[in-house]
Amino acid sequence: MKILRLENLTKNFGGLIAVNNVNIELQEGEILGIIGPNGAGKTTLTNLVAGTLEVSSGKIFFQDSDITNLPAHLRVRIGISRTFQTVRPLKDFTALENVVVGALFAKGESLSQARESAYKVCRFLKLERVDSYPDKLTVFELKKLEIARAIVCNPKVLFLDEVMAGLNFEEMKQMIQIVKSLKDEGMTICVIEHVMSVISELTDRVVVLDRGEVIAEGPYLEVSKNKRVIAAYLGEED
Ligand SMILES: Nc1ncnc2c1ncn2[C@@H]1O[C@H](COP(=O)(O)OP(=O)(O)O)[C@@H](O)[C@H]1O
Ligand SMILES: [Mg+2]
């Protein structure tokens, strides 16, 4: 069953078309990879789905209802969450408090319920130094904190925007396990990623974006042999 459908989705920034007539369907329970060179439109697409950017044209359907014009905070309530490529915790709050804030806002929980939910999520992610402030956390811990803030809202659909960036090999292995465990919890996940070994291991299917357009779609092994995809990545250097 499809849970999210993007229909002819387009976003212009002035003369630049960052997302161009994109059609993507997310099947419930799958891990979809979104790949493509820098500037392909992956983060913009995430912002459109989350509602942090308004679409220029096209539609977004969640469980068959049209959410194209739904405000971002209501999208979180119905079950759409995302992490930010550039982590942005609240600096004056501890790790735990950052997650508590997520639970308070998204779920409208009482403070004690929110603390309970936040602890649970941090334990699940093995984020141990919950009383530390963000400037004392490692990149790996900050990435976990980003995920904690996203999943404390109990999302049905989760967009992960480059959560592997800056991690070493061992941390990446742990992060892969985390994403798999989120899938086992029943989340439908969209993984935006540059590390192809991660895409290969995690995804059921990938969509390739280049200059805002979908240029290929299918299992990673198939898509990685596609001439247009190879050309798009080779073109990245110039
Ligand atoms: N807020 C913005 N204003 C103007 N241009 C933007 C904005 N956000 C992204 N862009 C441009 O849109 C294109 C796609 O960017 P982005 O979605 O960040 O790509 P990706 O995440 O795939 O690297 C790029 O050319 C980028 O410079
Ligand atoms: Mg990006």
Image (spheres, rainbow, N blue to C red):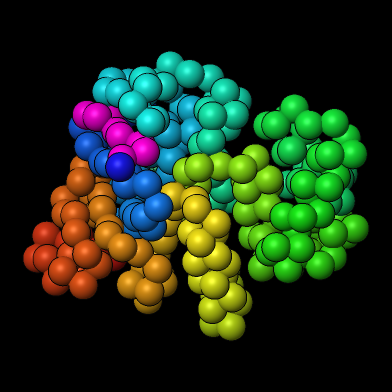
Asked if the stretch drawn in magenta spans residue 40, the answer is: no
Residue 131, image x and y in percent? 90, 58
Is residue 15 visible in the rendered image? The answer is: no
Identify the magenta region. Answer: 2-10
The quarter of the image holding the N terminus is top left
- Majority SS type along the magenta span: strand
Residue at point 51% right, 71% down? 176
Is residue 78 visible in the rendered image? The answer is: yes
Residue at point 33% right, 26% down? 64
The residue at the far left in this view is 227
Q: Nearer the viewer, residue 62 or 144?
A: 62
Residue 43, image x and y in percent? 43, 44
Residue at point 35% right, 37% down? 4
The residue at the far top in this view is 69
Q: Nearer the viewer, residue 104 or 19?
A: 104
Q: Is residue 161 above or below residue 235?
A: above
Q: Quadrant of residue 201?
A: bottom left
Q: Quadrant of residue 237?
A: bottom left
Residue 150, image x and y in percent? 62, 46
Residue at point 54% right, 29% down? 78
The quarter of the image holding the C terminus is bottom left
